[in-house]
Image: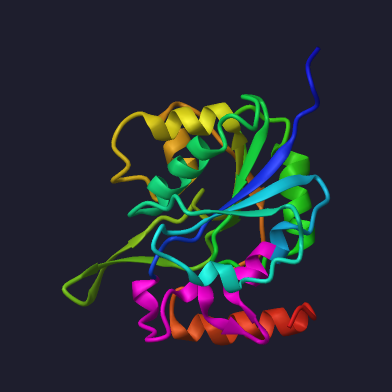
Amino acid sequence: MRHSVRYFGLIPAAGMGARMGSAAGPKQYLMLGSKTMLEHSIQAMLGDARIDRLFVIVAQSDARWQQIRAGDERVEFLPVGGATRAESVRNGLMAVAGRYDDNDRVLVHDAARPCLSGSELARLIDEAGADDDGGLLAVPLADTLKRGEEGRAGITLDRTGLWCAQTPQLFRFASLRAALATGSLADITDESSAMERAGHTPRLVPGGSANLKVTTPGDLVLATAILAAQRRL
């Protein structure tokens, strides 16, 4: 008898956030209001009751996660983080391999996207949950693209059909595990790129500009304003 599909989340949080340039340590532990960025991202991923469990992948040497107040029994920290995001996701999937079936769905979310809304999460599950190629939140590219040449605009690129990938990204558990188990991980920048390399065509599910990835100090200001508007601070 085939069981109903289960959804579980995975947040790779083993990185150092070098581009943030903070002396306070990894950016996922920076404070946004009274909570760390990671706590906000965890809270966002728990916003849909269909999420069976949420695994947070941290570095083996990281002890700061023990201070995180998840406040939900669905959250579990796994100290199996790798040197890159792709390695962390691969290690996390391997760590839970005996707990989920091939056809279950995994949603991978950035630790540095604390402003994900409940409606965006629900839309992704609704529109891509039954798709065997999976899907990801994304927004059509709005800005004009320039190719830089020695600090000057060399050429304007055609932006037709271009999208900015976001997270969460949702895929069939066995398919993503297989996609990350074969070939080099050096050129894998997100889970969708691994799936595309394996021959899949993930669905693009419209996201929103508020679901930004915090990368620079200026992004912290924007994220704080967005979370305040969402009344989550």
Residue 232 appearing in the image: yes
Which image quadrant for residue 198?
Answer: top left
Residue situated in front as seen by the camera: 51 or 211: 51
Residue 103 spot, x, y in % from top left: 66, 25
**Residue lying furthest right:** 49
Which image quadrant for residue 41?
Answer: bottom right
Assign the N terminus to one quadrant of the image: top right
**Residue lying furthest left:** 150
Q: Identify whether 194 is placed above or below 114.
A: above
Which image quadrant for residue 43?
Answer: bottom right
Residue 53 spot, x, y in % from top left: 71, 47
Residue situated in front as seen by the camera: 2 or 115: 2
Q: Identify whether 157 is placed above or below 136.
A: below
Q: Is residue 61 magenta?
A: no
Q: Is residue 151 left or right of residue 117?
A: left
Residue 210 appearing in the image: no
Residue name at image x 52 percent, y 76 percent: 29
The colour style of the image is: rainbow
Q: Is residue 126 left or right of residue 209?
A: right
Assign the C terminus to one quadrant of the image: bottom right
Residue name at image x 75 percent, y 66 percent: 71
Q: Is residue 138 left or right of residue 145?
A: right
Residue name at image x 40 percent, y 63 percent: 15
Residue 106 spot, x, y in % from top left: 62, 40
| Span colored in magenta | 17-42
Q: How many marks?
A: 0
Residue 150 spot, x, y in % from top left: 16, 73
Residue name at image x 80 percent, y 53 percent: 48
Q: Is residue 27 magenta?
A: yes
